[in-house]
Image (tube, rainbow, N blue to C red):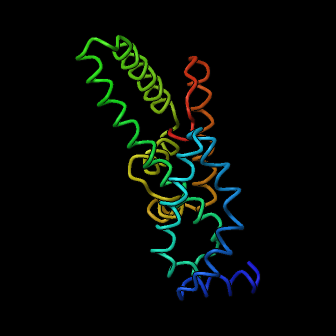
Amino acid sequence: MNELEKDLLRRISEGDAQAFTSLLKEIIPSLQAVIFRLVRQEDAVREILQEAFIRIWMHRDKLPDLEKPEAWLKRVTLNETFTWLNKNAYRARIFSGLSADAGVSESTGIDNLSLYETQKILQQAIDQLPPQRRRIYLMSRSEGLRAEEIARQLNLSSGYVKNALTAALDFLRQRLKDAGKMMLFLFI
């Protein structure tokens, strides 16, 4: 990160709205592309970006201390995207339940079966991982720990943990693909 970027982040952390606007103009295109790949709705992209920007502004005091601010901004945006996806999935389940009660939807049972099958395949694949890799994967996904936190707890290098996570995800993706379960692999 160069001095100009550091100065911009410092100004934002001090509440400079113009500096914040400048940062947003620079990062919006890349963030929009990431969000759109996940939600495929222009209105949703705008809604998620707005929520992400609010969150970033609320936590702007962290910006000057970040080693990789782009990664942090992307993580905040992805978290907001996943929140949006979860909310909409919940709404869809409620609507689906109401529709089923009204005799409108017959696919809910099939959808639940498909989800159950996918979860079963995923769990079997996780069980097939080597013990250390499985532990690292579960700490990352179940406990929500970052690679650095896992490395610290297991007394391993963060590079090793990142490599183990990458290998685990590749293995799980391949198992799901082999089983014909096409899904967003970001969620495993």
Horizontal and vertical percent position of residue 112? 36, 20
Horizontal and vertical percent position of residue 6? 68, 84
Horizontal and vertical percent position of residue 124? 45, 25
Pick whichever, 107 or 184, lies toward us.
107
Residue at the extreme left of the image, as rendered = 101
Residue 70 against residue 184 in the figure, above or below: below
- Drawn side of residue 117 relative to residue 72, left or right: left
Who's the residue at 66% across and 73% down the image?
A: 23
- Drawn side of residue 40 relative to residue 111, left or right: right
Report how many numbered discs are placed on residues in the image: 0
Q: In which quarter of the image is residue 175?
A: top right
Pick whichever, 48 or 66, lies toward us.
48
Who's the residue at 61% across and 54% down the image?
A: 162
Horizontal and vertical percent position of residue 105? 34, 14
For the N terminus, the image quarter is bottom right
Residue 28 against residue 186 in the figure, above or below: below
Who's the residue at 56% across and 25% down the image?
A: 176
Who's the residue at 55% across and 46% down the image?
A: 43
Residue 9 against residue 42 in the figure, above or below: below
